[in-house]
Image: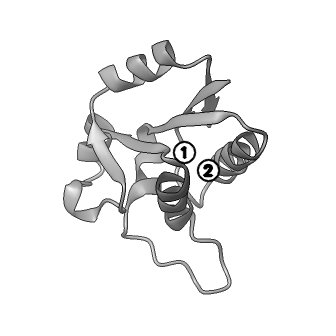
């Protein structure tokens, strides 16, 4: 099964980022293809290099980079949500890109499922 993920919450203020990551990891382990993670609203903060979590805490941005590099999962941030939060290409993690909402429509069309994490 091909799966797209929509993540609408920031990395450390809501469980959604952890749940989306763990879901993607489990789906891949079961042989499914996770095509893309589309970050919307505060979710765009997940794909920035601006965070510096303590050593004993999880690094959520590094998790998205790993999914991209190991499994080819696209990490895409909404341009409007990014601009509202002062995020540009210079602060994006490796493998992530800023794109328009039309890409979210494409993800929904080309995948069997689109799962939403966050409010």
Disc 2: CA contacts within 10 A as few (<14), some (14-19) or many (>=20):
many
Horizontal and vertical percent position of residue 13: 60, 57
Residue 18, picture quadrant: bottom right
Q: Residue at x 79, y 40 (%)?
A: 30
Horizontal and vertical percent position of residue 115: 63, 27
Kind of element beneath mark 1? loop
Return the disc, 1 or 2, that comes first in the chain's sequence: 1
Q: Is residue 81 above or below residue 66?
A: above
The colour style of the image is: one colour
Horizontal and vertical percent position of residue 76: 38, 41
The residue where tag 2 is placed is 17
In this view of the protein, which residue sits in the foreground, 36 or 6?
A: 36
Q: Is residue 80 above or below residue 29?
A: above
Q: Quadrant of the N terminus?
A: top right
Q: Residue 9's mark?
A: 1
Horizontal and vertical percent position of residue 108: 49, 17
Name the front one of labels 1 and 2.
Answer: 2
Q: Is residue 23 above or below residue 50?
A: above
Disc 1: CA contacts within 10 A as few (<14), some (14-19) or many (>=20):
many
In this view of the protein, which residue sits in the foreground, 63 or 51?
A: 63
Q: Is residue 119 visible to us here? A: no
Q: Is residue 9 above or below residue 61?
A: above
**Mark 1 in CB contact with mark 2 (< 8 angstroms):** yes
Q: Is 102 left, or right, of 18 in this rendering?
A: left
Q: Residue at x 44, y 71 (%)?
A: 51
């Amino acid at each position: 099964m091909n799966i797209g993920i929509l993540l609408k919450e920031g990395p450390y203020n809501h469980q959604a980022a952890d749940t989306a990551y763990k879901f993607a990891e489990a789906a891949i382990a079961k042989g499914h293809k996770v095509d893309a993670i589309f970050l919307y609203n505060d979710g765009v903060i997940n794909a920035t290099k601006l965070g510096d979590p303590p050593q004993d805490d999880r690094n959520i941005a590094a998790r998205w980079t790993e999914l991209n590099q190991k499994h080819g999962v696209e990490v895409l941030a909404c341009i409007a949500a990014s601009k509202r939060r002062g995020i540009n290409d210079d602060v994006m993690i490796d493998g992530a890109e800023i794109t328009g909402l039309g890409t979210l429509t494409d993800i929904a069309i080309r995948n069997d499922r689109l799962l939403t994490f966050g409010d």
